[in-house]
Image: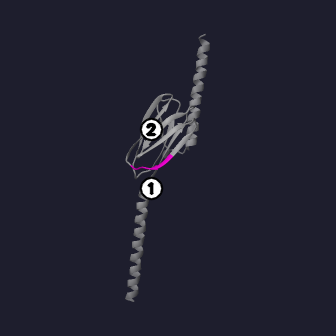
Amino acid sequence: MSKHIFQMYLQVIISKGVSAIVALIAVLFLAGCSKNEITVANAGSKPWHGIEVSVGGHVFVIETLEAGAFKTFDFDSMHEGGGFIAVSREGKKQEQAFGYYTPNLTSEVALILGDHTDGIEVVDMESTVQTIENLVAEKTKEGHTAHRHLQVLGQELASENP
């Protein structure tokens, strides 16, 4: 009888040990799998050129991003630190810092470029229900509507002052 109890006790110890080892392997595996995602989107009416995104020890380059297009990069952060984007259009260069990346945390960010070079909009995609396609369409519509209003206003002013 004591031999039977000893065998049962040994099986319990072995099964708990195996479970602990499997759990440890799973934790170690998941800790190294923090994926990040950065999307660069052009919500303007003209292409952007020479786009360079530096983040988490990586450098991503987009030669040309056409109007309405976007490009997504998935990566594991190798270094801790902030992100940086540099873009140019029609000879004007623009740079902006964004976010903070570590090897242990995930992040999903969209960098939205418009027609004006007064800023790059940074959108935390984890805190919105909109898709990148919806955001680009919305921003494109906003830009066209504002441009149309300015054209109408300019025409009205010109007709009032011949």
Residue at 42 percent of width and 66 percent of height: 23
Q: CA distance from mark 2 to mark 1?
A: 24 Å
Q: Quadrant of the C terminus?
A: top right
Task: State the image quarter where residue 97 is shown.
Answer: top left
Report the label total.
2
- Residue stretch rendered in magenta on the structure: 73-78
Contact check, label 2 and label 1, Cβ < 8 Å:
no
Residue at 40 percent of width and 50 percent of height: 78
- Which numbered tag is attached to residue 89? none
User: Residue 35 appears at what percent x and percent y?
Assistant: 46, 52
Residue at 57 percent of width and 26 percent of height: 147
Vertical placement of 145 versus 19: above or below? above
Residue identifier under label 2: 85
Mark 1 surroundings: few (<14), some (14-19) or many (≥20) residues within 10 A: some
User: Residue 161 appears at what percent x and percent y?
Assistant: 59, 11
As for residue 95 lying within the magenta part, the answer is no
User: Residue 153 appears at what percent x and percent y?
Assistant: 59, 20
Left or right: 10, with 143 as reference point:
left
Residue identifier under label 1: 33
Vertical placement of 59 versus 43: above or below? below
Dot 1 falls on a residue whose secondary structure is loop
Type of amino acid under label 2? Ile
Type of amino acid under label 1? Cys
